[in-house]
Image (cartoon, coloured by chain):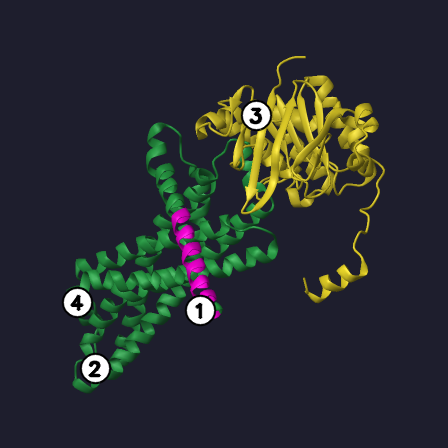
Chain colours: A green, B yellow
Amino acid sequence: MEAINKFFGSIGHSVLAMLNHLRRMKTMTAETFYWTLVAPLKGKGLKWDNTVEQMVNIGFNSLPIVATIAFFVGLIISMQSAYQLKQFGASIYVADLVLVSLIRELSPLLTAIIVTGRNGSAITAEIGTMKVSEEIDALRTMGLNPIKFLIVPRTLAMLIMLPCLTILADMIGIIGGYLIAVSTLDITSTRYINQTIQALVFKDFFSGLLKSVFFALIIAIVGCYQGFIVEGGAEEVGKATTRSVVISIFLIIASDVFFTALFYSTF
Amino acid sequence: MAEPIVQVKNLVVTYGNRVVLDGVNLDIYPGEILAILGRSGCGKSTLLRHMLGLAKPTAGQILIKGKDITSLSEEEKTELFKKIGMLFQSAALFNSMTIADNVALPLREHTKLEESTIQIMVKMKLELVGLSGFENFKPAQLSGGMKKRAGLARALAMDPEILFCDEPSAGLDPVVAAGLDNLIRKLQTAFKMTIVVVTHEMDSVFAIADRIAMMHDGKILVVGTKEEIKRSPDPIVQQFLNRQPDEEEMDREQYLNTITGAS
């Protein structure tokens, strides 16, 4: 009997704790939107210099790794699909496959995961360290709102830069696919390019971009929230950073299921 | 005596079932240095956090300049806290900014002063705490004592009326600690600032405080001048002043039960 009590008790505790986290995250998100969209209109300003700094960090500094991985993924899809399609004499459709799989799914997803690892973790570690060393309290006592100073610049930078990186990954991935197709299959350069342009559908591009905006929000909010709830010392910062990455990647993939169902479900 | 500038009325703070502050009443008068003294875990840091509006109390009021900070809106609080400075135990400097930028931050955010004026004010504040020439250093490049002084310069940036200090001399060597005490004393005489110091260092307290509030187990035991505190008959106060350890009351049976987990 006691074991059953304990079992359900622990489930109840976890559920309540999770609801509490969700509630606090909702409040934080709402305040972030207030300080991003409403407060600047009331003349309370936006921290542009901090935002630009974060944009360089998230966007520009992620370029090499995002570009390289997108290129490799382009090569891989091209090789895989060529191997299959050649058996049916349909090699030309490699162009369609590369394009569609990249812009619909792979570039938004992979870019988001790379940026989570690179910047989501950095956001949590940075804010967590500030929390532990009383810097957040210092901001508050100076009458400076931590949401405006720390969360809004990071969220805004993420919302702007992740879609940009995704578009870049689209293009570089396509180039990767093109190189394989032109060099190993009997397809001329012009034919491949024409085929790619024909296969390009606005809906695919748009749904990929919309997803990346949503993923950006997940990375920024989860990253900041996990940083803000750190209590204690360096060890807690490390744990929070891990948690931030795991939760972000989970939510990114889970929401991707939702978006795919929204745009492409056949039922 | 004048009206108190800070009034804590019946402040109760609980975390779950644990009572951290149990009905604290405290009046702080303009221009005085009040030291809040107590052992670790007595609730003095919690009291400070609440006086700074960093946490919401379970019950009670905190009036600063007649305004109850527990019920102020964020904007009113921001306005009120522009004239309040805080020196954190770890100095809490922003590690990504230079010392000058740290001190300049509140000026840049809260005033419309020109950058050249701000630069001059930053230099003045750093000069005041004896750190001129360190403008372009990052906090990580400074020693503990210098960090504290830089933190003090930042706390003074907006010319506060009230300055709160959390353990100003903790972790510093005696010479540097004495220097910081002098500096705090100087601020009070030169600028008629109200200063609240939270600490457990007796030497520092007797060097700077006008009045002392002694805390124990979430309550304020006694408030008074140094002499009044020294004369206090309260055994806990005397134990603290004479640096006596807690008496070992546990008998052998009890000890055995504690370590074996039997109750």
Amino acid type for the residue under numbered disc 4: Asn
Secondary structure category for the residue under label 4? helix
- Residue with the mark numbered 4: A194
Chain bearing mark 2: A
For marks 4 and 1, give the CA distance.
Answer: 65 Å
Q: Earlier in the sequence, mark 2 or mark 1?
A: 1
Residue at the spot 77% in from the left edge and 41% down from the top edge: B172
Q: Earlier in the sequence, mark 4 or mark 2?
A: 2
Secondary structure category for the residue under label 2? helix
Q: Specify whether B155 is left or right of A85.
A: right
Same subunit, labels 2 and 1: the answer reads yes
Amino acid type for the residue under numbered disc 3: Ile
Residue B48 x, y percent position in the rendering? 62, 34
Q: Which residues are magenta?
A: A3-25
Chain bearing mark 3: B
- Residue with the mark numbered 1: A4
Circle number at residue A85: 2
- Residue with the mark numbered 3: B118
Chain bearing mark 1: A
Q: Looking at this view, is B131 or B39 the one in front?
A: B39
Which secondary structure is most common in the magenta stretch?
helix
Amino acid type for the residue under numbered disc 1: Ile
- Hey, which quadrant is residue A181 in on the image? bottom left
